[in-house]
Image (tube, rainbow, N blue to C red):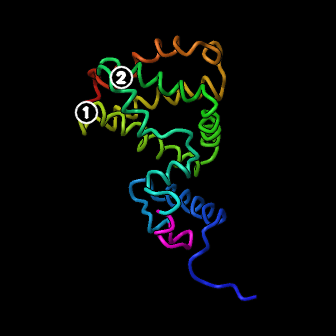
């Protein structure tokens, strides 16, 4: 039987091929420079098929990361309160996701990122473009300060995740989420909005 060339049929194999291509392109080029056309080319499908299955580039990225949540929906809601409570709100949001059944995928990805450069690139793109960028945009942080403030926030959030869920250092590993929010939130708030001596 001769195999027909051209567009692949719409099935689960095609979706998986698109996801694998997306992971490769996002890891190589980053979220901003990756395009649906490039991902379609890598997967050997028509760009329209990528849009059919996944919609936007952002949704494809979340699917390729196996993200249990959509930050574009959660972050604006979490940061809708007073600006001076943003740090606490952000830490509370992160812990609520990680402590839920949906958080298992995020923790597995973080463990993988610690030993695999390819996964680390994807994780970095996810944290920077989908989480931190959204947070600083919601808070109206100055563009010149945003990269450093975002990176400093990441030290707290990623550090908390590693200590609580990967290394499981006690008492942080079993501490009540509210206790951690109260302890870590103010540090995140300082990085987000307070003056940072010697940085700017």
Relative to residue 172, is residue 76 depicted above or below? below
The quarter holding residue 68 reads top right
Going from N to C along the chain, the mark reached first, 2 or 1, is 2
Q: Name the residue at 72% across, 88% down.
A: 2
Q: Where is residue 183 in the image (x, y as percent from the top left)?
A: 47, 12
Is 48 contained in the magenta span? yes
Q: Quadrant of residue 128?
A: top left
- Indicate whether 106 appears above or below 188: below
- From the top left corner, tell me how far across and down residue 154 is, in percent: 45, 32
Q: Farthest bottom residue?
A: 2
Q: Is residue 191 magenta?
A: no
Find residue 16 and name its label.
none
- Work out whether residue 65 or residue 196 is closer to the camera in this orientation and state it: 65
- For label 1, count other residues whose C-alpha is less than 10 Å away and answer few (under 14), some (14-19) or many (20+): few
What residue would you read off at disc 2? 86
Give the residue displayed 55% in from the left and 43% down from the top: 67
Q: SS of the residue at dot 1? A: loop
Numbered range of the magenta stretch: 40-51
Q: Residues within 10 Å of mark 2 (few under 14, many from 20)?
A: many
Residue 120 falls left or right of residue 73: right
Chief SS of the magenta region: helix
Residue 195, how many percent across, how many down?
26, 21
Residue that appears at 41% across and 18% down: 88
Q: Name the residue under label 1.
A: 140
Residue occupying the point 63% across, 39% down? 105
In the rendered image, the vertical position of residue 61 relative to residue 132, given as above or below? below
User: Which residue appears farthest toward the right when viewing the image?
Assistant: 1
Q: Quadrant of the N terminus?
A: bottom right
């Amino acid at each position: 039987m001769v195999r027909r060339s051209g567009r692949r049929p719409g099935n689960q194999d095609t979706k998986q091929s698109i996801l694998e291509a997306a992971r490769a392109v996002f890891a190589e080029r980053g979220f901003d420079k990756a395009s649906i056309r490039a991902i379609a080319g890598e997967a050997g499908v028509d760009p329209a098929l990528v849009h059919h299955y996944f919609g936007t580039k952002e949704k494809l990225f979340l699917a390729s990361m196996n993200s249990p949540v959509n930050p574009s929906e959660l972050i604006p809601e979490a940061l809708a309160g007073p600006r001076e409570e943003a740090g606490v709100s952000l830490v509370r949001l992160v812990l609520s996701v990680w402590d839920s059944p949906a958080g298992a995928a995020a923790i597995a990805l973080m463990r993988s990122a610690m030993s695999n450069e390819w996964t680390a690139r994807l994780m970095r793109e996810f944290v920077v473009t989908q989480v931190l960028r959204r947070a600083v945009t919601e808070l109206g942080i100055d563009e010149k300060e945003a990269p450093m403030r975002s990176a400093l926030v990441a030290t707290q959030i990623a550090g908390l995740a590693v200590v609580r869920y990967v290394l499981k250092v006690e008492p942080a590993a079993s501490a009540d989420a509210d206790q951690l929010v109260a302890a870590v939130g103010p540090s995140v708030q300082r990085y987000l909005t307070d003056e940072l001596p010697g940085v700017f």
